[in-house]
Image (cartoon, rainbow, N blue to C red):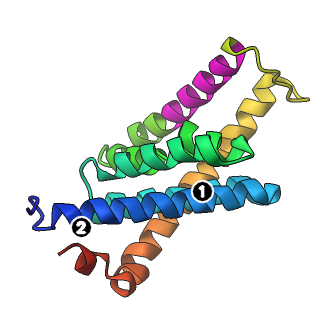
């Protein structure tokens, strides 16, 4: 059976499964080497970014949900999985939607979504009575996190450009799906 892009649905599901497994392995490596936890969460989000470009539709959401859920269940150090599940994993999907809006509204929507996710994660930690200590006033932490987010967004934009211009032809994912 083929979908509207002419791709075989069974192959699409198989590719989604492979992408999800690769994402879990990457997050697991980030948990084992604690210095690389944020880096590996970013690299795992690149898999979702590739799915947004190549597969479209609900498949990137499926990859994000499966990868995040399995990582939360299996990864020994949960920080990497929580960062991925809390924001980094689904941001490439939102980025594609947000960048359809022109001008400053795009940047406002991106920063607002980041801050809403950070507030939600902080609220969940408070709800679960988990200890949260920053060592700095919360407004300093918020400013630093927003600056890191802007760097993440710019880096993701550059990686997307590199993927579309260089890597896409070399990987030939569209040939896997037909």
In the picture shown, does residue 10 fall above or below 163? above
Question: Is the stretch drawn in magenta largely helix, strand or loop?
Answer: helix
Q: Is residue 171 above or below residue 75?
A: below
Q: Position of residue 86 (x, y in %)?
A: 57, 36
Disc 1 packing (10 Å; few <14; some 14–19; many ≥20): many
Which of the numbered marks, if any, corresponds to residue 167?
A: none
Q: Nearer the viewer, residue 42 or 96?
A: 42
Circle 1 or circle 2, nearest the eye: 2
Which residue occupies 45% across, 57% down? 20
Residue at 32% from the left image edge and 45% from the top image edge: 97
Q: Residue at x 30, y 52 (%)?
A: 59
- Report the number of numbered marks: 2
- Dot 1 or dot 2: first in sequence order is 2
Q: Work out which quarter of the rendered image holds the C terminus and state it.
A: bottom left
Quarter of the rendering occupied by the N terminus: bottom left
Magenta stretch holds residue 122? yes
Q: What segment carries the magenta color? A: 111-126
What residue is shown with label 2? 11
Q: Secondary structure at mark 2?
A: helix
Q: Is residue 115 above or below residue 56?
A: above
Structural crowding at the residue carrying mark 2, measured as other residues with C-alpha within 10 Å and reported as few (<14), some (14–19) or many (≥20): some
Q: Which label belongs to residue 42? A: 1
Residue 160 found in image quarter: bottom left
Q: Which one is in front, 167 or 77? A: 77
Task: Please indicate whether residue 136 sits to the left or right of residue 74 in the image.
Answer: right
Pointer 1 with pointer 2, Cβ within 8 A: no
Which residue is more in the foreground, 108 or 54? Answer: 54
């Amino acid at each position: 059976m083929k979908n509207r892009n002419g791709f075989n649905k069974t192959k699409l599901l198989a590719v989604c499964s492979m992408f999800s497994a690769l994402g879990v392995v990457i997050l697991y490596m980030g948990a084992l080497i604690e210095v690389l936890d944020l880096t590996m969460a970013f690299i795992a989000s690149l898999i979702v970014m590739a799915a947004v470009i190549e597969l479209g539709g609900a498949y990137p959401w499926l990859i994000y949900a499966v990868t995040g859920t399995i990582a939360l269940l299996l990864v020994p150090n949960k920080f990497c999985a929580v960062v991925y599940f809390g924001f980094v994993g689904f941001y490439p999907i939102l980025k594609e939607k947000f960048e359809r809006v022109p001008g400053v509204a795009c940047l406002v929507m991106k920063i607002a979504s980041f801050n809403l996710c950070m507030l939600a994660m902080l609220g969940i930690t408070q709800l679960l009575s988990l200890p949260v200590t920053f060592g700095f006033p919360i407004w300093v932490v918020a400013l630093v996190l927003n600056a890191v987010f802007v760097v993440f967004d710019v880096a993701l934009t550059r990686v997307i450009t590199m993927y579309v211009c260089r890597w896409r032809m070399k990987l030939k994912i569209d040939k896997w799906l037909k």
